[in-house]
Image: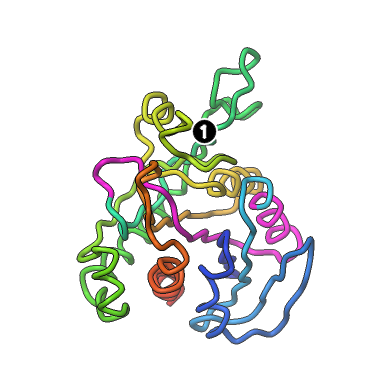
Amino acid sequence: MKTAIMSAMYEELNRITKQMNISRKTKIGNRTYYEGEFCGQEVVVVFSHWGKVAAALTATTLITRFGVEKIIFTGVAGGISPDLRIGDIVVSRNLYQHDMDSSPIFPRYEIPLLKNNHIETPETEIDKAFNIIKDFINEDFSRNFPAEELERFHITKPQVIVGDIASGDEFVSETSGTRQRIINDLPTVLCVEMEGAAVAQVCHDFDIPFVVIRIISDSANDDAHIDFPRFIENIASIYSEKIVEKLLF
C-alpha cells in the first residue's frame, strides 16, 4: 500500500524525510513531494502548507497524481477540552469545519450537498492508530525525547484520546470568541487546527482511508504562551517520526 504522510509545516516532517530512502522529488503547486520508502513501506511525504485550501489541494494531488491509497496527517493542534494538556495526542473520529456556514441555505456547519456536518474517520484507522500510539506511550515514550525538553513543557505521560477535531482558516483564541462558540456549538470537539477536516473531505470524496493525529501544543486561548518553534523542533517532530514509524512498521 502506498501511504501519504502529510503535515502543515516542514519542521513536523523533516525527521522523516531525513531518514526515508528518497527515490524521487517532484515539485507541483509550490510543494515538494518526496517519494520513496520509510520503514520498508512505500510512501509519499509532503508538507501541505497551512489552511484548508492548501491541505485540500495537497491531498487531491496525492490521490490523483501519486495514487496514494491512504493518508496520514500529523501535526500540532490547540486543545479546547479542559482534559487535554500539552503533549497529549488526539486521534481523529469526526472532523468538523468550524468556519463552514452556508446558512440559511444549509444549517450552520453542514457541508453543502453531503447532508452532514462532519466527516468520519474509518473505524479501522482509528483502532490501529489508537492502539499503536498507546503502546508507544506505555512502552518507550520518554526515551525518545530529551529529558530537559519534556521537563520544559511539563510532559510526563501523555494521554491518547480518540475524539472530534475542528478545522478552520482562523487562529482560535478566546479574544476572537471562536473558541467559546466551538465549545457551545460543537461540544464533542477536543481540539482545533487548520487542515484536518479538509483532508477528510477530499478522502471521503475519493473513498480513501485516512486518519488525523494531532499533538496538543497549547490550549487555544490567550494564555497559550510557549516556545512554539522549540516545541515543534524538539517535541512535535519526534512525535510525528515515531508515530508514523510504528504505524507503517
Residue closer to the observer: 171 or 201: 171
Asked if the magenta segment contains residue 180, the reply would be: no
SS assignment at label 1: loop
The image quadrant of residue 45 is bottom right
Q: Which image quadrant: the C terminus?
A: bottom left
Q: Residue furthest top?
A: 104
Q: Which image quadrant: the N terminus?
A: bottom right
Q: Give the amino acid type for the residue marked by disc 1 in the picture.
A: His
Q: Position of residue 15 (x, y in %)?
A: 50, 79
The image quadrant of residue 76 is bottom left
Residue that appears at 52% across and 61% down:
72
Q: Is residue 245 above or below residue 189?
A: below
Q: Position of residue 235 (x, y in %)?
A: 38, 70
Total number of numbered labels? 1
Residue indicated by mark 1: 98
The image quadrant of residue 164 is top left
Q: Is residue 117 left or right of residue 225?
A: right
Residue closer to the observer: 170 or 208: 170
Residue that appears at 61% across and 53% down:
50
Q: What is the span of residues highlighted in magenta in the rendered image?
A: 55-84
Q: Position of residue 204 (x, y in %)?
A: 59, 44
